[in-house]
Amino acid sequence: MSTASLPATPDGTSGPTHVAIIMDGNGRWAKARGLPRVAGHRRGADAVRRVVRGAGELGIPVLTLFAFSTENWTRPADEVSDLMGLLRHYLRSELEELRKNGARLRVIGSREGLAADIVRDIADAEKMTAANTRIDVNICINYGSRDEILNAARSLARRVAAGELTADRIDHDSFERELLTAGVPDPDLLIRTSGEQRISNFLLWQCAYAELVFVDTLWPDFGKEHLEQAIAEFRRRERRYGGVGG
Ligand code: FPP
């Protein structure tokens, strides 16, 4: 996979390889139109379809979307049920579209607390798209980064207690292998829509050096052109990773 269709950066580096998006503003989009919040989420699902296709066309190798956080369970039961319904529908009805886009789907997050049929749909969708190679599409469902980090620490602690590992040998690589994103490169670019400027417990470890781009567009209005603008902003930035730059 390559980002050959994207313009070169001033320092000649390519990328972004991995774009992560906090999709925000569905509720405000609906409210502004006097519609129920679910209408915003439905239009948000349309935006997901557009952006997956657009990212594939732009040659982005990895796209990660934050669809449902571990904190979203605190929303009113009706809204949680609407969101789960949309996710269920997406996992069942989008397989052909994902295939056309050459998209391999991976769902990142805890399966605990999800309905059994959704857990099955996730496994089926991952299996059906496993051979696709143009773009990896990760959808975060029931995901929270602090829990993910805690679980990684617990798992390593157990291995130390079992004598399989010594504490001194725990390094970035062994830690990352315990995260739900094991094998996924870190995001280079994190976009949040709707004008909010927060990370909201999303990929906290993985975004250590991500460029953050906050856009005012509400998620249901977001499309390929907005993705291109965010990438253009990313490519104007000089990434120094704590060094002094060139
Ligand atoms: C944030 O908007 C959005 C969400 C919590 C859910 C994201 C879900 C979708 C885009 C639709 C389904 C997804 C897929 C993958 C099919 P908000 O409700 O917090 O908006 P607000 O801040 O304006 O209230």
Image: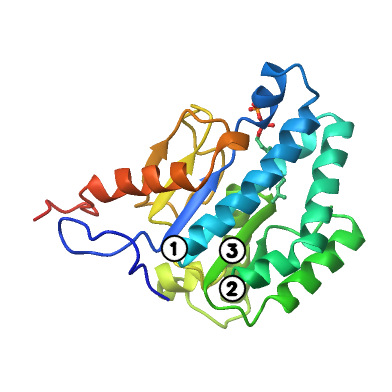
| Neighbour tally class for label 2: few under 14, some 14-19, many 20 plus, Cα within 10 Å | many
Is residue 69 at all visible to an observer of this figure? no
Name the kind of residue labelled 1 in the image. Answer: Ile
Residue depicted at x 56% and y 51%: 51
For the residues labelled 1 and 3, the Cα–Cα distance comes to 10 Å
**Secondary-structure class at tag 1:** loop
Q: Which colour scheme is used?
A: rainbow
Name the kind of residue labelled 3 in the image. Answer: Val
- First reached walking from the N terminus: tag 2 or tag 1: 1
- First reached walking from the N terminus: tag 3 or tag 2: 2
Residue pointed to by mark 1: 60
Q: In this view, does 6 lie above or below 231?
A: below
**Secondary-structure class at tag 2:** loop
Q: In this view, does 14 lie above or below 45?
A: below
Please give left or right for residue 218 compared with residue 227 in the image. right
Q: In this view, does 199 lie above or below 87?
A: above
Residue pointed to by mark 3: 137
Image quarter where the C terminus lies is bottom left
Residue 177's x, y, as percent?
53, 72
Residue 221's x, y, as percent?
58, 35
Between disc 3 and disc 2, the foreground one is: 2
**Secondary-structure class at tag 3:** strand
Camera-side residue of 159 and 105 = 105
Is the CB of the residue bearing disc 3 within 8 angstroms of ligand 1?
Answer: no
Camera-side residue of 151 and 130 = 130
For the residues labelled 3 and 2, the Cα–Cα distance comes to 10 Å
Residue pointed to by mark 2: 102
Name the kind of residue labelled 2 in the image. Answer: Gly
Q: Are marks 1 and 3 in contact (CB under 8 Å)?
A: no
- First reached walking from the N terminus: tag 1 or tag 3: 1
